[in-house]
Image: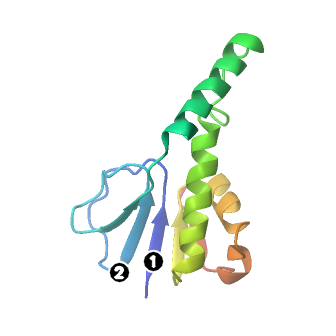
Amino acid sequence: MTKAIITMQAPKLTAIPADTTIYTLSGLVPADSKIVTIKIPGYVKFGDHILNFFVRKIIKNNPTPEYFNMLHFVYFSHMVAYELSVHPYDEISFATTDLQQKILMQFGNETRYAGKTTVQA
């Protein structure tokens, strides 16, 4: 049975089964785990910087956590959605419901993984 854990900010995980793949932005997981690190390209980081500047300075509103680094979230969820469409899993665990909804709505993953997902938040 293969399992995937999807989280943007991986906590320090200890015992991960051998058949588990972790999709994350950072590599704070055990060395013996299968980890897929999604690298955020420079243009996405720059776009987030411009977007956050626009919200803070032009609109004069502090960016809420939901919108801070929004392009990181969109890029990460798109790349993971593609990976899930290519590599089948028996069970998927998401860090948040937002991440679950955004990933499952792409590439037909919603029907492919119906009833096979959980949210840890």
Picture quadrant where residue 112 is located: bottom right
- Furthest-bottom residue in this view: 1
Q: Which residue is mark 1?
A: 3
- Furthest-left residue in this view: 31
Q: Amino acid at mark 1?
A: Lys
Residue in the foreground of this view, choosing between 10 and 86: 86
Above/below status of 105 relative to 85: above
**Quadrant of the snapshot with the C terminus:** bottom right
Q: In the image, is 10 to the left or to the right of 45? A: left
Residue 94 position in % (x across, y down): 55, 62
**Quadrant of the snapshot with the N terminus:** bottom left
Measuring 49% from the left and 38% from the top, which residue is drawn there? Answer: 42
Q: Dot 2 lies on which element?
A: loop
Residue 75 position in % (x across, y down): 59, 50
Q: Is residue 60 visible?
A: no
Q: Which mark is residue 19?
A: 2
Picture quadrant where residue 17 is located: bottom left
Measuring 63% from the left and 24% from the top, which residue is drawn there? Answer: 50
Question: Residues at badges 1 and 2 in contact (C-beta under 8 Å)?
Answer: yes
Residue in the foreground of this view, choosing between 58 and 115: 58
Q: In the image, is 32 to the left or to the right of 96? A: left
Measuring 59% from the left and 69% from the top, which residue is drawn there? Answer: 82
Comes first in the chain, label 1 or label 2: 1
Residue 81 position in % (x across, y down): 61, 66
Q: Dot 1 lies on which element?
A: strand
Above/below status of 1 relative to 29: below
Q: Amino acid at mark 2?
A: Asp
Q: Is residue 78 visible?
A: yes
